[in-house]
Image: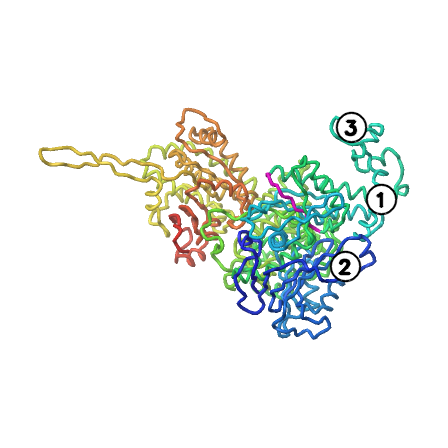
């Protein structure tokens, strides 16, 4: 389906509706002259005992008068409290007619309905009654869904209708819906003051600056505050005190269960019976000095403290009104402060908390006016509760119009929000036995490890409460029905770690998986139905062709052989990873911070959960969307974090950093005596040699058995010789140094003789982003000397490191610590750090560049430039050189990435299969790839 007639302004925001000139095929959505319907009878949004008690107008349908073809999809926003539905019906359609509609019709409408999430069966019956599930020519309809319920209810729709819900990003849909309504629908937005509604004038042919930027305050179960501009959106605030708070507290305090009943009840309440007012404190008088009237609320529910009564002494209506005002004021205050902070003049309130309720809108309007001192107005939307559902509805048309996948949100959301997958017992057991002594001989011949694999669907389990109980008291046999699976081990002597996976297994898996699923939600900042917890990551501004960017060099979805290889590789690395995790955490035993017994349980939980994810991907390669190797590695890190293993290699990283820093002064002294051209080569060799230290590679782990890191570094450094497998060093050296040959002329008689006397070097680059890989020798003996050379030439350097730990990759915090220690050993580094903080230090010339550190927003060994931190995006200003170091950032991902500036990719390949597939190379081959910036007319 395509979209026609949408305002051209919508093309500026990736989450909005694209505009296309004319309908070109069947199933085209024509938005030309879309408007709120004025000729239909008012209908309640849902049936129910209290549907009409709130005394508010129904959400009107939107007419599409130019629609000339049928639309065979609908969309839902499935939140924690409510399910919102948007669907299309042709005007010529007889409600009781056969489901085979005519292919050409005269106009149509978008309809809006809601249902309580706890009564999802009502929604299912409505869809069946309206025959929305029937697609063209007897097929199935396309169903777009957003919100946490899209995952929770996926099987319900599959079983009931044979429909696979197509999941969309929650925040993206909310913004898309708001933009469409504000740009295309006349009389959609309005202000509400003292019971009077005033529509915000719709300006035909208006420019973006008449709308953008604006603040969208989306009030669902929680609150998300989003800054929306012409070129994108950013979550800039939020609060956990939202509609779910009001509903939950009101239910506890009054016993009412229906939200509309609560709103209706508040209309007859008197909050002064439970709230402490200013007049209660000042003897009925105003507090004029600060402009507070005697009726201003000084403390919500504060009068209860003064009266000393019990719950039964207070009227339900008074309690309900007090709660409503308390939460409305709180949200309004936060929204106003956010708007002032970001210098925004327009605030739109959406979400199903408001529901067109007059008292709520009056309260919000008064609060915004008061806290902004009259400079801002609260504006509301007639379709406020359907922003997400409407945005999801429009995604299908947008996707086909733009010829791109509709699932552009972070894959990790889909992974995290899915319940923990279950393995196929029979297949896994056979595979483990078949591979005994080969790829799955994880630890050694003769040693076996019994793990049970649950066949219980996690979605039927109650949640985190029971999981927490499991961690404290252990599981019960009643939890699940299990089947034992034998995993053969390779090494005889594994110490206590070997035992931690074989004891106390009964009933473990269900609780383990339940715990992991919920912890993944909270650790990643995602929670079903609570929009405000979605993390904010942005597109990297220096990508040359963002819409064609694909980070992964290996397509494990399409190629089964590649998928099996990498899934098996990750499985093999699991035992060593867990051994490090347990050893690291048990080192704290006795400090009171960590229980070794608890660590063993969590390790067992992680092992089962991650293995089950890998197993699911063998059966269902697209279970979490289109993923590559980078997402597999990110999945592992998320699972580790979910079970409390925040930094598995913390102790190792500290030891290796200290050992490398001890020899850094000698290395810098050796480099300083070299000629410039020789020094640049030595620096690149140093980066490549340091990159061998990667605990995520089995070949490198094996090297650690043969010596210390310094011994390994020296051996590797001495063995690196050009030409490398990919060798663009000469091009980079010329670009870096900007070599100009200067000649002198001497006259001998009538002859002129030219003689080379010097080469003058001048730095070409103003600012470099250097993406760092591993701790220890990699960053200390490789990256720091390289960055120091750039700084010496006057180039500003920003070292970019992970936000969260991943294997032995350096984090931004660890990088800052290493640099502080290195600054005591090198005046250039010390001065550059000072200059980076706006200070001058030492006797170093001001020509030395500034040195800063930035967190990438990543917690993975790889790097996806579609999801980076706001700080990194800000740091790109003035950048004319990008350095990607390490196999994860320069090879596994971003091997083919093109940027708007010069790019240097440096890595040592620690996987023979990867080396062969990329350039017919071999393990430990080196890559020095230099790519000048792409000009505007360059192709991909």
* Res 695 label: none
Q: Which residue is mark 3?
A: 287
Tell me, yes or no, whether the two marked residues, 1 and 3, touch with CB atoms within 8 Å.
no
Report the residue marked by disc 2.
Answer: 44
Q: CA distance from mark 1 to mark 2?
A: 24 Å
Q: Is residue 142 above or below residue 191?
A: below
Identity of the residue drawn at 76% across and 27% down = 288
Closer-to-camera residue (381/733): 381
Which residue is at the far top?
843
Residue 30 versus residue 830: which sits nearer the camera?
A: 30
588 vs 145: above or below: above
Horizontal and vertical percent for residue 161? 69, 68
Task: Say if residue 562 shows up in the picture.
Answer: yes
Is-magenta flag for residue 74?
no
What kind of element bears circle 2?
A: loop
Quarter of the figure with the C terminus: bottom left
- Kindly indicate the quadrant of the structure image that contains residue 17: bottom right
Asked which secondary structure carries label 3, the reply is loop
Query: Around disc 2, counting alpha carbons within 10 Å, would you say few (fewer than 14), some (14 to 19), or many (20 or more)?
Result: some
Quickly name the residue at label 1.
Answer: 269
- Tell me which label, 1 or 2, sits earlier in the chain: 2
Compared across the picture, whether 222 is left or right of 889 comes to: right
Q: Secondary structure at mark 1?
A: loop
Q: CA distance from mark 2 to mark 3?
A: 44 Å
Residue 349 magenta-drawn?
yes
Q: Mark 1 and mark 3: span between their CA atoms?
A: 25 Å
Q: Is residue 523 above or below residue 620?
A: above
First in sequence: mark 2 vs mark 3: 2
Q: Earlier in the sequence, mark 1 or mark 3?
A: 1
Please rate how many residues cluster around mark 1, counting C-alpha atoms within 10 Å: few if below 14, some from 14 to 19, many from 20: some
Which residues are drawn in magenta? 342-351
């Amino acid at each position: 389906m395509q979209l026609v007639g949408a305002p051209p302004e919508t093309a500026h925001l990736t989450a909005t509706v694209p505009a296309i000139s004319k309908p070109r095929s069947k199933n085209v959505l024509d938005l030309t002259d879309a408007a709120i319907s004025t000729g239909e009878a008012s209908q309640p949004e849902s049936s129910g005992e209290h549907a009409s008690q709130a005394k508010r107008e129904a959400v009107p349908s939107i007419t599409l008068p130019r629609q000339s073809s049928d639309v065979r999809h609908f969309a839902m926003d499935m939140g924690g409290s409510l399910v919102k539905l948007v669907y299309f019906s042709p005007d010529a359609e007889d409600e009781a007619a056969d489901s085979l509609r005519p292919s050409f019709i005269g106009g149509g409408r978008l309809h809006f309905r809601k249902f309580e999430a706890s009564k999802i069966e009502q929604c299912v019956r409505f869809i069946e009654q309206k025959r929305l599930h029937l697609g063209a020519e007897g097929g199935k309809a396309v169903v777009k869904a957003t919100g946490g319920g899209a995952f929770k209810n996926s099987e319900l729709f599959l079983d009931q209708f044979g429909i696979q819900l197509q999941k969309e990003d929650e925040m993206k849909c909310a913004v898309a819906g708001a933009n469409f309504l504000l740009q295309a629908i006349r009389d959609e937005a309005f202000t509400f003051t003292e019971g009077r509604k005033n529509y915000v004038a719709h300006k035909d042919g208006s420019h973006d600056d008449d709308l953008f930027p604006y603040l969208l305050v989306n009030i669902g179960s929680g609150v998300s505050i989003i800054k929306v501009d012409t070129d994108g959106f950013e979550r800039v605030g939020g609060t956990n005190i939202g509609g779910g708070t009001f509903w939950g507290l009101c239910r506890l305090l009054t016993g009412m269960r229906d939200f509309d009943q609560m709103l209706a009840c508040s209309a007859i309440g008197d909050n002064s019976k439970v709230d402490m007012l200013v007049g209660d404190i000042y003897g009925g008088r105003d507090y004029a000095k600060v402009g507070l009237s005697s009726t201003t609320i000084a403390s919500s529910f504060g009068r209860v403290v003064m009266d000393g009564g019990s719950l039964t002494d207070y009227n339900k209506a008074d309690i309900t009104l007090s709660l409503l005002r308390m939460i409305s004021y709180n949200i309004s205050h936060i929204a106003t402060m956010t708007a002032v902070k970001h210098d925004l003049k327009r605030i739109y309130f959406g979400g199903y908390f408001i529901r067109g309720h007059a008292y709520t809108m009056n309260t919000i309007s008064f609060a915004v006016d008061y806290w902004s001192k009259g400079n801002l107005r609260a504006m509301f939307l007639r379709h406020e509760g359907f922003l997400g559902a409407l945005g999801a509805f429009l995604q299908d048309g947008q996707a086909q119009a733009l010829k791109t996948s509709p699932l552009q949100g972070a894959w990790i959301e889909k992974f995290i929000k899915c319940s923990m997958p279950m393995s196929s017992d029979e297949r896994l057991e056979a595979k483990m036995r078949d591979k005994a002594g080969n790829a799955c001989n994880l630890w050694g011949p003769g040693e076996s490890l019994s793990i049970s694999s649950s066949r219980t669907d996690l979605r039927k389990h109650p949640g985190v409460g029971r999981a927490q109980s499991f961690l404290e008291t252990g599981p019960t046999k009643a939890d699940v029905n299990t089947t034992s699976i034998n995993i053969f081990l390779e090494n005889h002597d594994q110490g206590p770690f070997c035992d931690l996976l074989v004891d106390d297994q009964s009933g473990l898996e269900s609780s383990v998986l339940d715990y992991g699923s919920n912890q993944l939600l909270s650790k990643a900042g995602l929670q079903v139905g609570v929009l405000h917890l979605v993390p904010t990551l942005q597109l990297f501004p220096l990508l040359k062709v963002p819409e064609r960017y694909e980070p992964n060099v290996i397509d494990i979805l399409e190629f089964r052989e590649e998928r099996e290889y990498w899934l098996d590789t990750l499985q093999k690395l699991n035992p060593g990873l867990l051994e490090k995790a347990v050893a690291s955490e048990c080192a704290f035993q006795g400090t009171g911070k960590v229980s070794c017994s608890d660590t063993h349980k969590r390790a067992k939980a992680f092992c089962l959960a991650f293995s089950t994810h890998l197993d699911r991907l063998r059966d269902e390669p697209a279970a979490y969307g289109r993923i590559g190797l980078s997402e597999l590695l990110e999945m592992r890190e998320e699972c580790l974090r979910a079970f409390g293993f925040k930094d598995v290699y913390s102790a190792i990283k500290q030891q290796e950093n200290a050992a490398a820093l001890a020899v850094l002064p000698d290395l810098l002294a050796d480099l300083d005596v070299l000629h410039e051209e020789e020094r640049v080569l030595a620096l690149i060799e140093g980066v490549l040699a340091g990159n061998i230290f990667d605990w995520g590679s089995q070949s490198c782990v094996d090297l650690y058995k043969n010596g210390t890191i310094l011994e390994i570094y020296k051996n590797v450094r001495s063995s690196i010789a050009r030409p490398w497998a990919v060798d663009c060093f000469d091009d980079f050296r010329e670009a870096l140094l900007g070599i100009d040959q200067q000649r002198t002329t001497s006259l001998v008689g009538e002859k002129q003789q030219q003689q080379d006397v010097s080469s003058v070097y001048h730095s070409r680059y103003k600012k470099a982003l250097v993406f760092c890989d591993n701790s220890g020798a990699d960053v200390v003996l490789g990256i720091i000397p390289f960055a120091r050379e750039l700084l010496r030439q006057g180039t500003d350097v920003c070292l970019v490191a992970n936000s969260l730990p991943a294997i032995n990759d350096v984090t931004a915090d660890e990088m800052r610590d290493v640099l502080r220690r290195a600054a005591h050993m090198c005046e250039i580094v010390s001065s550059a750090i000072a200059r980076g903080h706006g200070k001058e230090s030492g006797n170093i010339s001001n020509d030395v560049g500034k040195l800063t550190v930035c967190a990438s927003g990543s917690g993975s060994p790889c790097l996806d430039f579609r999801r980076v931190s706001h700080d990194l995006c800000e740091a790109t200003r003035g950048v004319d050189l990008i350095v990607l170091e390490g196999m994860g950032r320069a090879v596994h991902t971003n091997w083919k990435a093109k940027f708007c500036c010069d790019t240097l990719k440096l890595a040592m390949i620690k996987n023979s299969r990867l080396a062969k597939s990329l350039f017919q190379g071999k393990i430990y081959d080196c890559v020095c790839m230099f790519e000048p910036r792409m000009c505007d007319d360059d192709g991909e």
